[in-house]
Structures are given as structure tokens and as C-alpha cells.
Amino acid sequence: MLKKIFNIAINLLKITLRDKGALVWLLVMPLIWTVLIGSMSGPKSSSNTVPVGIINLDNGTYGSNFESYLAKEKDIVIVIKKDETELAQLVKDTKVSVGLIIPQDFSDSLKLNRSVEIKLLKSEKSSSYFIEELIGKVAKRMSIDALSANFALEKLNTLVQVPETSKPEIWERAYKIADAYFEPSPSIAVNYKVLAVEQKEQNVAVGMNLSSPGFAAMFVMMGVFFAGAAMVAERHHGTLARLLTTPTSKFSIISGEMLGFFLLGLVQFLILILFGQYVLGVNWGNSPFGVALLTVSYVLAVTGLGTLLSVFVRTSGQAGAFAVLVSMVTSMIGGSWWPIEIAPKFMQSIARFTPQYWAVNGFNKIITRGFGVSSVLSNFYVLIAIACVSLFASVVLFRFE
């Protein structure tokens, strides 16, 4: 009996793989959709740095020093401008976070121990608090350096009459000595982190991490359902009835057909996983055993549902139409096309009635969040339950005539 079941399954697999039209839907279309939708829904490439526009009007060297100190901050990129009107427009358009204008007398004011004001331009459209903090940190550093240099020069002048020609050189040396204490500075650092609105589900899958498992689930269901349509055609043409005239039991025939559906879906899913892993860069390998559990249980579930679909349709044309319709609609609802987390709450509740939800949700836990086998056991149990119910119903309700 087992040999007959296996032979029927392998025969169905060979017939399907020889069909070029079937191969297009089983492999070519999933790969195209995965790449196309994954590219469209992926995160836009962006720099981690924040642009800060600077106009340096200083006649001395300390305006340039201010720029260099600010440029050392890891989160800032300096945009040099010459015209204040142009800089103001960039700030208004939020093309730079803030605009900074260093005045002409900046260096002279530091050397003469005078207060000096730096002009800061910011927009109402964007928050620039942490940029202002970084600018304030640089300004405070230079203020301390200048204060130390002036203090040292004053104290030295009280002890020894310093010639006027030597004062600039002494001031410069004292300034550099004071500034050296900031490299590295044993200060307490504050790490800024921008927090988004808290969501129930974190680490939402996007790009290829979403499209690879999502469209694999959709097209595997579609492929198995199309195989179910072929079974309807066999029943319509009397092929299954003629098989009953041979020494082959009904159980062997239907079991062989189901095994063929399962192997077809398994091979298709495996190819799509390997393509996602080695071509698209999706990390399917965080938990191979977890991926295997989800894959096998999902293919079993859609095998049962595909066979059950073939029970209720009358023609292969109807079966093909339902295969496309059911696969696409349930995939949209179940989170194959877009993150289920962005859907309304009532849609998220409906999604739980689709096998795609439990498969994609489980793959998301492994691929995006890096979880292990224990995290996907609930998904596995639900898919196995769907498989058991649908396979049992298919065996009970299936008609050979």
C-alpha cells in the first residue's frame, strides 16, 4: 500500500513539474513578486547623520575650530554655506536640521575675554533639541578653553611682566593645553534615542524580510490549490473512477494525491526559502528547526485545504478560479502583502482565521526578531490543527465520481 501511495505522489509531482505553465506559477511568479514588492516596501536608504548648515564669518582660526569640533560628533554632517538667506531657506525646508552662523569677531572675542554670540536658525517643522545640545557642548568647551587661557595669562602677568608681543603666543599655548583635557574627556555622556509611538508588535518586517516569507506562503497555497484543480479534472474525466477498477484502494489513491500535493508544496517552499536566503539576503537561518516546523505544518494545512476545495467545486475551471481568489484574498488578510501590524484591530482578528497569518507571523518571529523554536510552537500547533481538521474532512467528504 505504501508503495502505491508513494508512486501516485511521485507521478503527480512529475506531471506537474513537466508542465511549463505550472512552473511559471510555482516558481517564476513568486520570485518576481517577492523581489518587486520587497523592493517597493523596503526601508528607504538614509544616512544616520543629521545635516547642520554653517556660515563661518570669523576672521581668525577659532571659527574653524568650532566647525571641526562639531564635525567630530558622530551624528552630525557639516554643510558649509556662504549666504544667510540660502541657509535660512534650507532650514525652513528642513533640508538641514539647524543653521549656525559664526560672527566675524568670534576669535578676537575669545582672546580678549569678551562675550560673543553665535546665531542659531531652527525650524518649527522639526525638533532640533539634541543638535542644540551638541552645539552647546562645543560652545561650552571652547568657552572653558578660552577662560583657562585668559586666567593663565593673567596670573602669569602678575608674576612676570609679559611683553605684549608674547601674549598672543602664551594665550594660544594655554588654550591648547586646556583643550587637550577634552581629548578624551572623562565626562558623563548622554545617549539620545528617538522613540516612535509604542506598538503592540515590535520589529515589524519590511522589504524582503516581509515579501520572502509572505509571497512564499501565498504562492505555495496557490500551487497546491492548482494541483487540487487537477484532481477535479481527473474526477471529471473519470480517471479516479477508473483507478478504482485496479487493485488500488480509495485510501491509497487519496493518500497518494495528498502526498503529491504536500511534496509539491514542500519543494516549492524550499526553493523560495533558498532564493530568499542566498539571493535576497533574508536571514532564514536564525532557527532552521523552527523554519522547518512552520514550513511542514503550513504545507500540510494548505494540502488539506486544497483537497477540501476540490471536494466542493464541480469543474477544474472553477477550481482554478477559486485557487487564485482564495489564495490572494486570504494572503492579503493574513499579512503576506503588508505587515499585519498596520491593519485595523478587527482585521488583525480576522487574519487569525487564515493559515498565512500563523505562518508569516511565525517566520517574522524567526527572521525579523531573531527568536527561536519555542516562540513559534503556538504557530505550529495552530497550523497542525488546521491540517488535521481539513485533511480529515477531505477524506470523509471526497468523491471519486
Image (cartoon, rainbow, N blue to C red):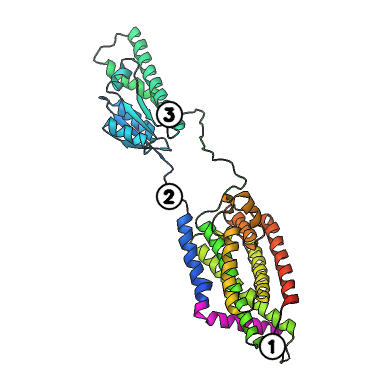
Label 2, on which residue?
45
Label 1, on which residue?
241
Label 3, on which residue?
132
Please state which of residues 372 and 399 is positioned toward the viewer in this rendering: 399
Which range is magenta? 1-21
Q: Earlier in the sequence, mark 3 or mark 1?
A: 3
Q: Residues within 10 Å of mark 2 (few under 14, many from 20)?
A: few
Q: Residues within 10 Å of mark 1 (few under 14, many from 20)?
A: some
Quarter of the image where one finds residue 69:
top left
From the viewer's perspective, is residue 23 above or below residue 35? below
Q: Residues within 10 Å of mark 3 (few under 14, many from 20)?
A: some
For the residues labelled 2 and 3, the Cα–Cα distance comes to: 26 Å
Please state which of residues 139 and 24 is positioned toward the viewer in this rendering: 24
* Magenta span dominant secondary structure: helix
x 42%, y 40%: residue: 49
Horizontal and vertical percent position of residue 38 = 48, 59
Quarter of the image where the N terminus is located? bottom right
The amino acid marked with disc number 1 is Ala
Query: Is residue 286 found left or right of 391 in the rendered image?
Result: left
Q: Earlier in the sequence, mark 2 or mark 3?
A: 2
Asked if residue 301 shows in the view, the reply is yes
Horizontal and vertical percent position of residue 332 = 57, 60
Q: Is residue 10 magenta?
A: yes
Q: Is residue 46 magenta?
A: no
The amino acid marked with disc number 2 is Ser
